[in-house]
Image (cartoon, rainbow, N blue to C red):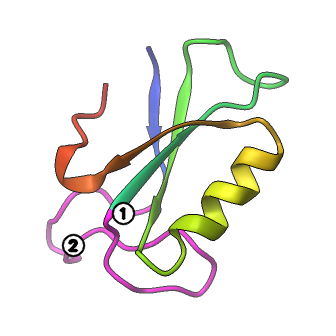
Amino acid sequence: MSIDFFGDQPEGPQGPPQCSAKGCRADAHWVLVWNNPKLHTPDRRKTWLACEEHREHLSQFLGVRGFLRDTVPLADWTGD
């Protein structure tokens, strides 16, 4: 499975990962795993990070399009 990590990588020189919502700089707590079947092979997964405030909004955005595959707490994310 191919994984693309959207947004900052896990904690490093830039600090903790941040939410992928436009303009949000809050710490991320969730990984939204998604795939666009018109563009990506079935095993490819892309990710967005979400803070508590934007988790539902970003999930709905992906879900309405049929892209959302999974939502995982960032603390439990293994990247596979």
Q: Is residue 74 magenta?
A: no
Q: From the top left corner, tell me how far across and down residue 11 is, in percent.
A: 16, 65
Q: Residue at x 63, y 79 (%)?
A: 22
Q: Which three-letter amino acid code belongs to the residue tagged 2?
A: Pro
Considering depth in this image, is 78 or 52 the residue closer to the camera?
A: 52
Residue in the image at 77% along x and 22% along y? 37
Q: Main secondary structure of the magenta part?
A: loop
Residue 56 position (above or below residue 27): above
The answer to which image quadrant residue 5 occupies is top left
Counting from the top left corner in percent of width and height, residue 76 is at 19, 44
Q: Magenta span has 8?
A: yes
Looking at the rendered structure, which numbered label has been put on residue 8?
A: 1
| Residue that appears at 63% across and 63% down | 58
Q: Which residue is mark 2?
A: 16
Mark 2, other Cα within 10 Å: few <14 / some 14–19 / many ≥20: some
Numbered tag placed on residue 76 in the rendering: none
- Is residue 2 depicted above or below 53 in this figure? above
> Mark 1, residues whose alpha carbon is within 10 Å: few (<14), some, or many (≥20)?
some
From the viewer's perspective, is residue 52 above or below residue 44? below
- Image marks 2 and 1: residues in contact by CB distance under 8 Å: yes
Spatial separation of the CA atoms under disc 2 and disc 1: 8 Å
Q: Which quarter of the image is occupied by the N terminus? A: top left
Q: Residue at x 34, y 70 (%)?
A: 28
Q: Which residues are magenta?
A: 7-29
- Point out residue 51 in the picture as x, y percentages from the top left corner: 41, 74
Element type at mark 2: loop
Q: Which amino acid type is marked by label 1?
A: Asp
Q: Left of 36 or right of it: where is 27?
A: left
Residue 61 falls in which quadrant of the image?
Answer: bottom right
Quarter containing the C terminus: top left
